[in-house]
Amino acid sequence: MPENGYQYDVLYIGAGHGTFDGAAPLAAKGYKVGVVEADKIGGTCPNRGCNAKITLDAPVELVRFQERMKDIVSGDLTFNWAENVKHEHEVIDGLPDFISGLLNDSGVDIIKGHGKLTGAHSVDVDGTEKTAANIVVATGQRPHRVDVPGSKLAHDSTEFMAMTELPQNITIIGSGYISLEFATIANAAGSDVTVLMHHDKALRAFHQPYVEHVLADLENRGVNFVKNVEVSEFTQNGDKYTVSYNDGQSVETDWILDASGRIPNVEELGLDEVGVKYNEHGIEVNDHLQTSVDSIYASGDVLDKKQPKLTPTAIYETTYLMQLFSKETTDAINYPAIPSVVFTSPRIAQVGVNPVSVADNKDYTVNENNLLDGWYRLVDNESYAKNTIVYDADHKIVGASEVSEKADNAINSILPAIEFGFGPEELGRLVYLFPSLESDTKDLL
């Protein structure tokens, strides 16, 4: 039974990965758990994020592979955008019901409606009060919109992934994950793409030499990058749109994608009323994911945190809270090494210590490898593949960055070495399948 006469032991606001990966096992342990959600169960990642994006990207991988094999495999591939979006929905449309089933089967109460905090132990759901010993805010993020006249003429990432017909000309505002990934997809599908960068560098959290290679590759494929742009206005003239910037410059386009970032969903939650502290980066928490109100916690992308705001991070956080609430631990959260990847082509992935941050530190060694020196990368005719490995004073791997068609899988293969502090002896005991990407990666460590 819930503590102290509350209706729930734990009540979650939001039903994304910051919730359901922890709520279901918590309920399965016998705790009374409720989840409040006004939108689709599953949140951003299953419905309008990771799952949809990687499905739309799958044909890009195939097209790129055929390009590299053009002298071996005859014929050109054509990109059917409408069928690609249809397949995307075949992948994602059943996920809310699937996730709802997991929650229901575990004994979680799904409460449809908008949740707003009214006290340290209470949430108003569209006029009905729900009470809980502990509350978790896991409301995630949403697309940022540039604040200029005509901003409503632009579209966001959700709308991009729902288009059944791809415009001939697309202009993208921003140069982060979403911008570069969708520029890759749209360009491969046949659109003329212009990317307006707010700064002179893209993907600033990633190893810049690798980012520059990806940008150069996209430029060679026809993507136009304009740097140091200050957007001033969006206007419409018939079926065309104009993006004005930098005191008199402009670009005409068929469709505008605002990929200027993502912001935490902290509005209309009652945070101010109950005293939960937050800032422009999200809700402030301590090392137990506890907010300034002891009984209220937060999880997922809505947090103000140094860790990457990614699905795996949210899963780790909600799993930690499950262990905390079920009294399996009283320890502070101890984040593992969390990798990041940009699904361009080639991909950029990284984990751990960034090589630039320790370039002048004698306690670290930074080695760059041309991965084409490892024969396995030649199998599918990769023309450019590099990684940079960071070692500490004991020659243990503490960081890795890679640009290649297989960077995501390669960084995953290095991840255990970084998380568990493998040195030469431990690495020597890893015997991977051969031939394989993992064995090839290990040979160059």
Image (spheres, rainbow, N blue to C red):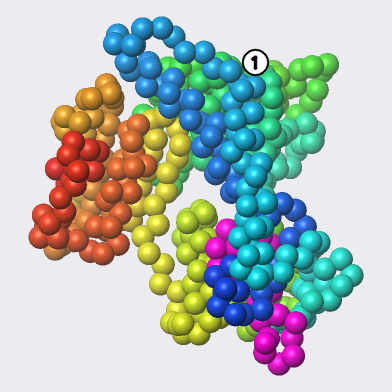
Classify residue 189 by image quadrant: top right
Q: Is residue 370 visible?
A: no
Q: Is residue 303 left or right of residue 216?
A: right
Assess whether residue 298 is covered by the magenta stretch: no
Query: Which of 394 and 89 lies nearest the eye of the viewer?
Result: 89
Name the image quarter holding the N terminus.
bottom right
Query: Which of 182 and 393 lies nearest the eye of the viewer?
Result: 182
- Return the x and y of residue 305 as percentages of the image width and height: 52, 64
Rendered position, 200 above or below 41: above
Rendered position, 330 above or below 92: below
- Return the x and y of residue 323 as percentages of the image width and height: 49, 77
- Return the x and y of residue 385 as percentages of the image width and height: 27, 31
Q: Which residue is mark 1?
A: 168
Rendered position, 352 above or below 202: below
Residue drawn at point x = 49 percent, y = 25 percent: 59
Amino acid on which disc 1 is placed? Gln
Magenta range is 1-23
Q: Is residue 23 left or right of residue 253?
A: left
Query: Which of 406 and 402 lies nearest the eye of the viewer?
Result: 406
